[in-house]
Amino acid sequence: MLWDLLDFPGFSEVEFQNPDFFWLGLVLIPMIVWYILKNEKSKASISFSGYEGFEKASFNYRYWFSHILFVLRIAAVASLIVILARPQSHNQWENVNTQGIEIVIAMDISGSMLAEDLQPNRLEAAKEVAMKFISGRPNDNIGLVVYSGESFPQCPLTMDHTSLLNVFAQVKNGMIEDGTAIGLGLANSVNLLKDSKSKSKVVILLTDGVNNRGMIEPKDAADLATLYNIRVYTIGVGKEGMAPYPVQTPLGVSYQNMEVEIDEDILIDIAKKTGGKYFRATNNESLKMIYEEIDQMEKTKQETAVHSRTQEEFFLFAFLAAIFVLCEILFRNLIFKTIP
């Protein structure tokens, strides 16, 4: 039986352990009837020839105020009944044990990532979608590796996603020598994750080209990922056919259509070998959907334990009952005291 008439601070609901005691409230009815009848019988009667002389008599507030003694008695009895019903509160709280996933995003920042078949270009589109992905995973350790002709960790695994996003925003083409070292980028990503104790370790590797630099072959880096139980999701970026690339000329920037070359066989092999999946992003919307799909496949695991603590809440009513009884005694002996 819930009681929602009072809003007690510190707990959400109140229950009565012995609600049957509320039947004692019926005793208040005969008490009220008895008081009314007693009050009627106690009225004085007098014979008089007319009542004109009483019309200007002042109203006796003291008489009507005397009824407060009975009201206080009724309130005290009602409080005692509530005490017998034994009100209790229940504080409930949850302990959430979160098992985060450790993720490294390996981002290709080579010159070809400036192609504008995605808007405003492949690199900026990839950064924007990846940053939204990071913001939606507050319980995960996430790191960043960038690569082109060389590769290096741009940000170690961290749950400080604000700092990570700031680092992400500064990523641009030209930070390191140009080229496409897919194997080296994946190997550096594995290096960030290999000592992790997490049960779920993931690399999201994004590229728009063919491996043409670096001392580590992509298949060898995939073997390393498999050795350390790391899943690799590979993303090939670029539409089919030709794509416009910006080219710097003496007269300014001009655009040339160049063929899109993505080594999909290598990317598919990496994903298959490590238990991941290969995706192809030909526009902004498909890239967004790819990250949303990865987000659904790599959900953070949570275990929730609910605890409850019972607390007796009769103290308020005991205090009120004492106040009501004390007030009745004081009023009866100080204000409404009768002299024999």
Image (cartoon, rainbow, N blue to C red):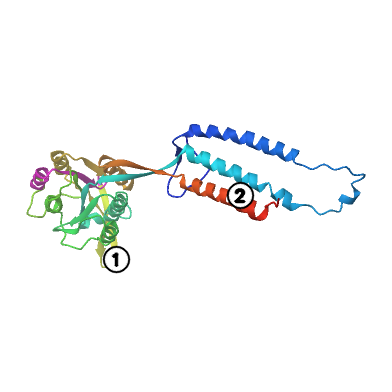
Residue closest to the far front: 340
Look at the image and tell me whether residue 37 can be seen. yes
Count the marks: how many? 2
Q: Residue at x 92, y 45 (%)?
A: 50
Q: CA distance from mark 1 to mark 2?
A: 97 Å
Which of disc 2 and disc 1 is earlier in sequence? 1
At 53% from the left and 49% from the top, the residue drawn is: 322
Q: Is residue 261 magenta?
A: no
Compared with 285, 248 (above or below) is below
User: Alpha-carbon neighbours of circle 1 within 10 Å: few (<14), some, or many (≥20)?
Assistant: few
* SS for callout 2: helix
Quadrant of residue 29 within the rendered picture? top right
Residue at the spot 23% in from the left edge and 52% down from the top edge: 142
Picture coordinates of residue 98, whole percent (x, y): 26, 46
Range drawn in magenta: 220-241
Q: Which residue is mark 2?
A: 328
What's the residue at 60%, 36% (across, down)?
Answer: 28
Question: Taking 108 as reference, is 52 left or right?
Answer: right
Q: Which residue is mark 1?
A: 252
* Residue 76 percent coordinates (x, y): 56, 44
Counting from the top left corner in percent of width and height, residue 245 is at: 26, 55
Quarter location, residue 89? top left
Q: Amino acid at mark 1?
A: Gly
Q: Which mark is residue 123?
A: none
